[in-house]
Amino acid sequence: MNKRPRKHSAEDYSTVLRRLESLSRNLWWSWNPRAQAIFEELSPLTWHTSNHNPVAVLNQVSEGELIARLGDEEFYEGLISVLKAFDAYLHQPASYPGAGKKKGGPVAYFCAEFAIHECLPFYSGGLGVLAGDHVKSASDIGLPLVGVGLFYRQGYFQQHLDVNGQQQESYPTINPNAVPVQLVKDYFGKPLFSNVTIGTSIVYFQGWRINVGRSQIYLLDTDVPENPEHFRGLTSLAYGGDINTRIRQEIILGIGGVRFLRALGINPSVFHMNEGHAAFLTIELLHEQLLKGVPKSKAEQSVKETCIFTTHTPVAAGHDRFPVDLIDFTLHPYLDSMKMTLKDFMSYGQVPQNPPDKNEFTMTILGLKLSRAANGVSKKHGEISRFMWKELYPWGKAKDVPIDYVTNGVHLPSWATRSSWEFWERHNSHKWKEHLHDPRFWVHVTDPSIVSDEELWALRYELRRELIEFIRRRSRDGHVFGGASGADALGHLFSFDALTIGFARRFAPYKRAPLLFSDLSRALMLFNDPQRPIQIIYAGKAHPRDGDGKELLRQIIDITRQTPFHGKIVFLENYDMNVARHLVSGCDVWLNTPRRPMEASGTSGQKIAINGGLHCSIPDGWWIEAYNGKNGWAFSGKLEENLPAEELDRREAELLYDILGNEVIPMFYRRDKNGIPRKWIERIRNAMQSIIPVYNTHRMVSEYARRYFTK
């Protein structure tokens, strides 16, 4: 007997539509594929052309159509299920260390960029992805947290490659009304404004709120009528402009961020600076204390008690430095207000014994001097940071420098594609998201009696096919370089059976993107074996002012066009979170080739284990800690003093050829009578058991909470 359709009242529909609108403006949907499926079903075309933006979908669907769609009982029940899951999520108990004991206001997490989802392009790369994943996990475990950043109306940049393989940049403007952000308003319903003084000018800004589960991010925006034109565009571009733009953006972020939180009535118990870009917040906190008449030494101590600092950069050139004359001109109103001399102010950002010709103000030093705790982002990076900054401390010995480490992680539900997400839902009764940093759980659920070799191999084939079909669609649209193009790409580009390697990251010289092709004869031996075919996918952007990085990118494009490699190497244009999600799920091997010790942590390789991928990397950053000999591969030569970079590259390229040719490729193609690579899958299980429960942001944020937030 057919089930009779259930009838719903107009009031029921009205309530559901209000809740659907609310859901579209909370980024919780970005790590829940079933919620995403609701919006995709409403308008598949808008969903894909808007880069998966639910606000754009609802803007394209009339209320009449929505009400009509709710008459489809299957769609209605699916939506109600998602809304119930969302409500339950918002009200679930906190699970971070010290939950129930934490006193005072939330943690204020300041960062120059936040990558939450591809439809909100307010990010450049790894720093933003880490910040976004940090906020998501804070929400998941119930840690009270607000993020503070900048509203980049033109984002970082959109990447386009010309016929010569040269990177070109464009900067489309974001319409705030078409993305899931909300203008922050005051009691009277008008935009909430705050301001800072930069040099001789007062600069006004408003804020846009992003709801991220139970957390919020406030992005500050100077594009308001109250500002002259040259200040309206101050926050338009991520890392855009010259040193003058940089210091002004960092004043908005640090000083302005504190003021905006105060205007909202938010009084954080902890200020967490994620990299030196935000370190001017300490100056505003100091300013507040001095204006109250607190003596300078006590004011400094008060600031230190509320601040912690995370550094991400293992090379001196990567830390923001400003000359004394720029500091004097730009910040003199604060010096005057605090009754502080320029020399005294400069001391907050300097090593005491620096010679006069190095009279610069360093943001990292400011963050270190006015924080009660500081950390690097991996064990090795902690060691490097202690050595880098040992001159700041009177004892001058690196081992005694008070910079610890908290190794970075990733928000795994955000990096599991819909297929992976549903795979784990089926195999452990929806518990996997609750046990992301429970090693015993992952040993249990990856046991062959729970998930068979056949099921894992089926998942790998499904994800590889999804990736290759994604590449073929993008090639048809002209966004892939190498192999077939246009209509031919739909049936011929890449193989669903070949070992697929991924290399996707910022095209900076130290990351050595072309290392695999250092010796073309050795590379040809690997790529031209018809019995054991391999293929590699590249993606990534070079900074607009990084000529060396752009040249490396062009070299990769040239290699894709060489006849022996044709159809076996592709470059995906305009790398973003959507491209990254496809790559970390579909690639069998994630390749990482940094020049040591310049990878502070790295997180892209942490995203693959949840999808059954394996990591092959130089032992640097997080991989030094994670590699156990059975959960991926590591290759490196002995680091020698004064060894020329070219010679080190040559040696490590040889090691890469050896490990691929003698271990990785043979293991992938060594199959039993049923066509299953048992040893390969054994390594996948080991990776899942050892990497998933440790290298995730649930563990990372819990560690910050335990060590720095709830004491």
Image (spheres, helix red, strand yellow):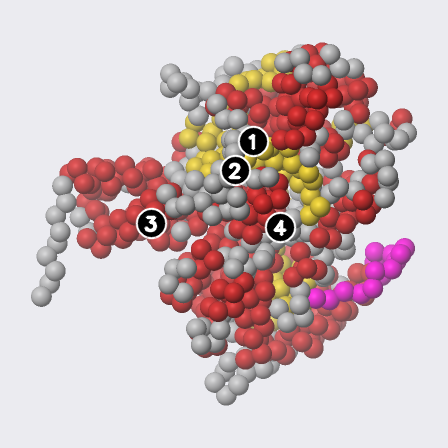
Q: Which residue is painted at 48% across and 23% down in the image?
A: 265
Question: In x, y percent, where is residue 192?
Answer: 46, 20
Indicate the quadrant where residue 249 lies: top right
Comparing 444 with 413, the one in front is 444
Dots 3 and 1: beta carbons under 8 Å?
no
Q: Which mark is residue 102?
A: 2
Residue that mark 4 sits on: 408
Question: In x, y percent, where is residue 386?
Answer: 78, 44
* Image quadrant occupied by the N terminus: bottom left
Q: Which of marks 3 and 1 is nearer the N terminus?
A: 3
Residue that mark 3 sits on: 85
Q: Residue furthest front?
A: 101
Q: Distance between the residues labelled 3 and 4?
A: 28 Å
Q: Distance between the residues labelled 2 and 3?
A: 27 Å
Q: Give the range drawn in magenta.
A: 634-647
Q: Which residue is painted at 55% across and 59% down in the image?
A: 693
Foreground label between 4 and 2: 2
Q: Which residue is painted at 47% across and 29% down in the image?
A: 208
What secondary structure is marked by label 1? loop
Q: Which mark is residue 269?
A: 1
